Structure formats: C-alpha cells, structure tokens
Image (spheres, rainbow, N blue to C red):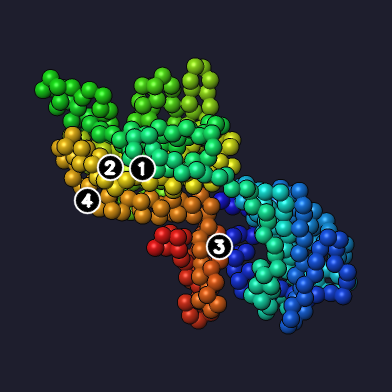
Amino acid sequence: MMQFLGKLSASALAALVLTAGVAGAADVKPPKDFTAIHADNGTGEVLIEQRKGETSARAAFDGALNGLATYFDGRPRVLGAMADDDDTEVQASFVASRGQTVYSGLVVVQVGAADAVVGVAYDEGKAFGGDAPALMALLKKNLPAAAAAPQTPLQLTQLPDGSGTIQLPKGWNVNAVNSMVDVIGPDGQEGHFGLWTPVYTPAGAAYMNSLGVGTGVIPVCNYTDPESALKVLAGNLARAYGANWTYKQRLGAAPAPFLPGKAAYLLYDADITVNGKTVTMRTLAVIDMLPTSQAQWAFYSSSVSCPAATFDRNLPTMLAIWKSWKTDPRVFEARLKQAAEDMKAIGRIIEDVNDYRQHIMDRAVDDWDEYIRGTSQVLDRQDGTLREVPYYNLTERLNQMNQREGYERWQVIPLKDINNP
C-alpha cells in the first residue's frame, strides 16, 4: 500500500506516466554514477543509477536528487511523490532548470535485497507532453532489476498423517491430523491450514441442553460474519491451550466470493499471552462460514502468521508454504464425508470443494496478494504489455484515459486470471 509524500495522487502520477512526454537531453556531462541514454527521436533523455548497499528507497531518492543538483541549476523541485510502506519503491515528478530552460521529469526508485536502482526521465517543459510513452519504455528497457532477496529453499515434506504434502524450509516443524495442518518456524512463524470445526448456534446449543445432551467440545457462536466469528472462536481455542488471545486491530479485509458460505480474507493483529509474555502476532487468513443446519454451521480457516515486526519479511516464504500445501483428493473426500456423517447435513461442502479447492485457494491468494500490495495489472492493448499500477480509483482513471484514446486501450487483468485462469 502506498502513502503520499506530496500532493500528487497515485491517479495523477499514473496519468502523467502514461500520457505525458519526457524530455530534452542536454549537452552536459551526466552526474557522477549516472549513465545517460538519449532517445532515438526527440530530445528526451534517461538517466540510470545503481546504488550499491542502499536498502532504503527514500534515502536513494534523496541521494539521487542531490546528484541531479550538479546536472541542473540546483536540486530539482519535487512536485509530488509516493512511496510504499516497506520503503522499497518511490515514484516522483519534478521540475528543474538549466540556464533559461525549464525541465520536467519523473524519478523511479526500486530497492532490492542489497542495492537500489534509480531511473530518471526528463525533457524540456514544452516537450514534456509528447514523448512520455517512448521515454518510459526506454527507461523500463534499461533500468536494471534491483537484486531480489534470496529465495528460502523449500523441501517437499510428507504430512505425518499421510493426508498429503507440503514444502517447508529447513528447521520448520509440521503436524497434521485428518489433513488439518500446523507448521511452526524457528522465529515464531506459524501456518495453520484446513482447520475446521462444527459450531452450534446459541439456539442450537440451548436445544441440545434441553434434551440433556449438551454440546461437548463443540463451540457455540452466532452465525454472523467471519471477523466476528473469529473473535469468539479463536479466543476460545487459545484458552483451551492455556493462552490468552486478544483481537487487536483489523488491517485489511476483502470478500472471498469463490468460497461457499460467508467467506473473507482478513489481515489482522492479535496479542497472544503465554506465561505472562505477550507478543503481537500479525495474521493473514481466509475464513469461511458454512451453514449446515438451523442448529449448526461449520467454521473453516487457513492462515499464516508471525510476530508483527517481522511479518513483511516472512510473508513471501509463508505464502509459498501455504500455496505448496496439497491434500490427497481421496483423503480430503473421506474427511468431508465423515464431517457429513458427524454433522448430519454437510453435503454441500463435499459438492464442488473437492475438485476446486486447490484452484480456488490459489486464486484466493492471488486476490489477497493484489489487495495487500494495493496494485492491479493493466493491459495496454496497443503494445500487448502488462503494467502493475496502484488500484486506487483505477476504474475511474482508466475510463478517463480510454476516453482520451478514443478506444478501450487500457484493461484491468486480475492477477488470478494470469496465474490461475
């Protein structure tokens, strides 16, 4: 998710990149550590810098502006900029002057595991409205990729109950019972996949009690919404294991329309207290509530979590583990059939879920990936390229841009339709 550093909105910057021109190269020696690339046509110029050892996009941006101060008549004036919360990307527009000539341009900064790359595209102000697409293509072509963080190697692991497989990094532990899986990492990382339980409604529990049967270990909760149910059921489960679980805040939520029942993705913080020690855990979960009868419903959850301070760093590995989890179809079908027998009316779960569960989960993770990054994929029908852009007010911006083009040039392509059609 992006935060604004100035008054330029994400929509204004996207429109600027896609519809404005970038401009005139000058007969001046490029700043130290910058490489200059002149456009084949026009007077536009692109500058490239690679800053070794720099892991802050904001610091790299500030350093680039200082370097550009020697190229122009002083440090460029930033009109507006935006950066991501993880300090890995900055995009900004600027104006600068050299003598009597005013220049306009864009700066893009991207940070990898151990370096930062800076790209600058600019031209004279009068030319800034014509050459932007070509200049941005030139910048994209020549901008080196920032070194990515090393991939954590995963090893294929058989689940202890024989219900399927999962891929785990070295040092992780796994347990599985009836294809419900728990994985624990060495630094407080956790994954809980395929967990489910029958739940009595309060009315259903009262009826069972009136018969002298009771509800046993089956929890009691209203059939409300995923977040409200989570607050009740997760707290009860934690207390059963001697811990105190307190819901702290919701950081994000989105519907999960491809799952049956009431389903949603949640990103939230919760405080876990064990033996007097409290840790704030951040969790990404998909939760589904499946009605089974007037007296009962089923609660399903798959999630990854770790201490909030290390969540962003651990999330790529945890998502890779989540997506690698495979349940043997025969085991999954047998589990659902047993659930149907135990709960008397859960046949709807067996329908469709067995064949589509893995595909749905992959598409769900893609949906959430777009949601937490705050971006969408946009197809340029003119050259067939895909661009990742902020999705804030994206539909409105694309409509305006397509109206200017006179045809449907720009089209949103969901990430799930690319990865898991």
Name the residue at 70% across, 62% down. 144
Could you tell whether 324 is left or right of 4 in the image? left
Element on which disc 2 rests: helix
User: Which label is found at residue 388?
Assistant: 3
Answer above or below: position of 248 versus 336: above
Answer above or below: position of 53 versus 47: above
- Residue at mark 3 to residue at mark 2: CA–CA distance: 39 Å
Do the CB atoms of the residues marked 3 and 1 lie less than 8 Å apart? Answer: no
x and y, in percent, of residue 4 in the image: 63, 53
Comparing labels 2 and 4, the label whose residue is closer to the camera: 2
Do the CB atoms of the residues marked 2 and 1 lie less than 8 Å apart? Answer: yes
x and y, in percent, of residue 137 in the image: 65, 72
Element on which disc 1 rests: strand
Q: Which residue is mark 2?
A: 331
Mark sitting earlier along the chain (4/1): 1
User: Which label is found at residue 164?
Assistant: 1
Q: Which residue is mark 4?
A: 351
- Residue at mark 4 to residue at mark 1: CA–CA distance: 20 Å
- Residue at mark 3 to residue at mark 4: CA–CA distance: 36 Å
Do the CB atoms of the residues marked 4 and 1 lie less than 8 Å apart? Answer: no
Name the residue at 87% across, 75% down. 27
Comparing labels 3 and 2, the label whose residue is closer to the camera: 2
Comparing labels 4 and 1, the label whose residue is closer to the camera: 1
Residue farthest along the left direction in this orientation: 211
Element on which disc 3 rests: strand
Examine the rendering and report whether any part of residue 6 can be seen. Answer: no
Question: The residue under label 3 is which amino acid type?
Answer: Glu
Quarter of the image with the C terminus in it: bottom left
Question: The residue under label 4 is which amino acid type?
Answer: Glu
Classed neighbour count for the residue bearing mark 3: other residues with Cα under 10 Å, few (<14), some (14–19), many (≥20): some
Mark sitting earlier along the chain (3/1): 1
Name the residue at 55% across, 45% down. 153
